[in-house]
Image: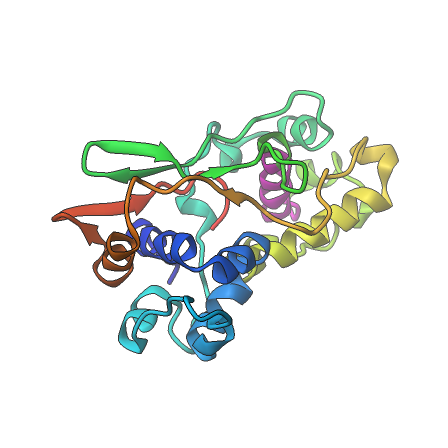
Amino acid sequence: MALNELQWGRIFALAWRNNDFKAALEEDPATALLNLRDNPNFFRRRPDSYIPPLDVIREITPPPGDDEIVDPNRIVYPEDFDSMQPTRLKEIIQNKKPVTMSIEYWFWGEDKGVATTNDERDTISLRDWGRIYARLYADEHIHLPYFKSEFPDSYHPKKDYSIRFRLSPAAVVNAIKKEFESDREFHKSTIGYRRNRLFALKSKPDWCDEQLEEAVKTGMVGNMLFRRCITKCC
């Protein structure tokens, strides 16, 4: 089962408290979380590196045997990709009439802040995230005859991108990037991403280290829940 918004809030709090975990999470969330679960000392590289107790780690990472971290169907989309006609998905994939994904926010009581940014040179733009999700949903319906006629032969057979994305967003993004690069005539442009970061974590709430650790352990600070609204990835 995919991680929920409260678990992701605790994960982000840990990333703000541990820079090595933050860097790994931005680049490949699935690998970062599995390393945290299976080998927490991997992120204990500095004298001041904070690693939560093992029972807390178990609460914020996928359980063994179920490595799913994100459910594409629970992401907040600006448009309904799943019900789009193939011609509309094609327009998005080819960057002719793009869909720009929404900004992600964290919520703490009545406070709200930007959780991640995609405006840095080594991250995927919100516009390219729209193309990625259009490709994901095109793959879901590629077996239908009226979808097949709109897309190149390389889209067949189905790639199971949606299932694979649940387990490793970074792996699917890199596969789609390679697909776009291999057929520039159809896709028009590739994804502007150098395998550095899927996103960049923004500024945390105005908390000290002790409050960040409280958020990691309990999901709350000052009796108020902390959560992340998922609008792009993970």
Q: Position of residue 39 (x, y in %)?
A: 47, 79
Which residue is at the front of the view, 1 or 149? 1
Q: Residue at x 46, y 40 (%)?
A: 202
Residue 160 seen in render:
no
Q: Is residue 136 shown in magenta?
A: yes
Vertical placement of residue 229 versus 47, above or below: above
Q: Closest to the observer: 153 or 14?
A: 14
Residue placed farthest to the top in the image? 97
Which residues are the magenta region?
A: 129-143
From the viewer's perspective, is 213 left or right of 161?
A: left
At x 85%, y 41%, the residue is: 183
Lateral position of residue 115 relative to residue 10, left or right: right
* Residue sitting at x 41%, y 78%: 64
Residue 216 appears at what percent x and percent y?
29, 59
Task: State the scheme by which the image is colored.
Answer: rainbow
Any part of residue 97 in sight: yes
* Residue 228, x across and y down, in percent: 34, 44
Rendering quarter of residue 27: bottom right
In the image shown, does 193 or 205 lie closer to the viewer?
205
Magenta segment main secondary structure = helix
